[in-house]
Amino acid sequence: MNYLDFDLLIERAEKKYKARVLNSPAGQAAVEFSLPFGEAELENFILKIAAPRAGRINSPELEAAAKVFGSSLFEAVFNDELLACFRSSLDEAARQGVGLRLRLRLADVPELADMPWEYLHYPKLNRFLSLSVETPIVRYLDMPERIRCLAIDTSLRILVMISNPADYPQLNVEQEWAKLNNAFSSLKRRRIVELDRLDRATWLNLQTKLREREYHIFHFIGHGGFDRQANDGMLIFEDENNRSRPVSGQKLGMLLRDERMLRLALLNVCEGGRSGRCDPFAGAAQSLVQQGIPAVIAMQFAVTDETAIALVHQFYDALADGYAVDSALAEARRAIFGQQNNIEWGTPVLYMRSPDGHIFDLVKTRPNITPPPAGLIVRQGANHGQAISLGAESKIIGREAGQSVVLPDPDISRRHARIGWQGSRYILEDLGSTNGTFCNDVQIIGSQPLCNGDVIRLGRTVLVFQLESE
């Protein structure tokens, strides 16, 4: 998906804050606002959603709390002329058939940076903004160095560092590694991803590994902290005696910035998470971006195993299909939400300095991949029970004779949609139909990758996408 940008700068204004739209499809706007909640109220909300989640991820109570928080924050910031500007920008993006990327600039207000802005909720539309591919939220840092999209003619190489010092709560390292391999299994089978593991999570081992091979992504699993004196986030490495060694985001960034191929860091806290307002990875992520990493994803809270697997699988899968990093993360959020997970989709935070989110060009990594056998089954409609085989050649679905798949449904356009194999995935594309093309009850704009079991609705006809290998 392509995007227009809605650049929102927040700065101090005496005892209040000022929100200024620097750039948008509808021009500029500015308002002053105060936070709609007190310090204690904010901390209670953060502790509530950051608590251990077993059995609570589908909690209506947590979802309601997130809506109240997100709606209060939205109505405080998006009011008067700024709200009008946002509405007009959404309308213009819809007219052009693109999305609207909300780029938050919070560098001048660090006390707001560790708030979970990802739960912004537009109450009149009853919509969490970041849960839609059409309105991703990015923590944006405008840096002078230009970011170029990196052309990759090999597999996407990911270096995984699992830090487990003896003086911190212990992780099941082998289980964490097995979870990652499980999440990456389909991408590894398709030779799109190579996963390397750092044997010991020490500074010298990391430096040596980076010298031996070039990597595109750094994936950290472990603990984090915050150095209030240095005002920087810390990642907890191991030392040579398997004790903890705090490494600041700035220091790690100085090591990683010389890696010309590195485009993304993903920081995943496994145990502990937050103990209050402070997000231990927020400072580290921002420091990495300031030191030159084009995009960093950090977890605000500890997540369940199911969420971690869904996030990794869907995010990297979409990234391999050429999605911009913010679009890929939006796909992952929707996958998490689709698992009846009412709250954890808001845990990932994207920090970015790439202007359009395109950090990789992976077209050359998948030139000769043979599409796996797949098909569509008509579950509802005039052709109920019909099986439609899919393969290398695209199929156009419509009601007009002569199309690859003809469905006698008056609400389907003559040339309604196309399904075909592109790169490494089956892709569903709307062809400008009158009544729209829906996947899992969400209308698609342009095209969208398909996953096994996806439910497609065209007019009154419902089809199910099935990969025969799964």
Image (cartoon, helix red, strand yellow):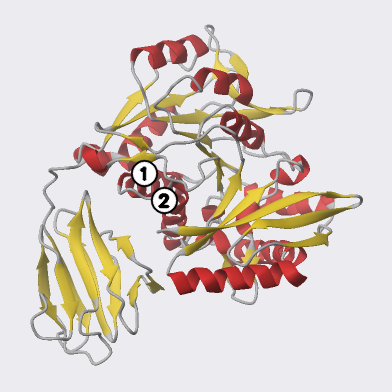
With respect to residue 436, does 243 lie above or below?
above
Q: Quadrant of residue 239?
A: top right
Of residues 295 and 373, the one nearer the viewer is: 295
What's the residue type where badge 1 is placed? Tyr
Q: Which residue is mark 1?
A: 316
Amino acid type, label 2: Ala
For the N terminus, the image quarter is: bottom left
Instruction: From the viewer's side, name the closer residue of 277 and 100.
Output: 100
Mark 2 element type = helix
Q: Is residue 236 left or right of residue 396?
A: right
The answer to whether the residues at label 2 and label 1 have Cβ atoms under 8 Å apart is yes
Residue furthest bottom in the image: 410
Task: Inspect this view and state whether residue 466 appears.
Answer: yes
Residue at 56% in and 70% down: 90
Up/down of 356 relative to 73, above or below: above
Binning the other alpha carbons within 10 Å of mark 1 as few (below 14), some (14 to 19) or many (20 upward) gives many
- The residue indicated by pointer 2 is 328
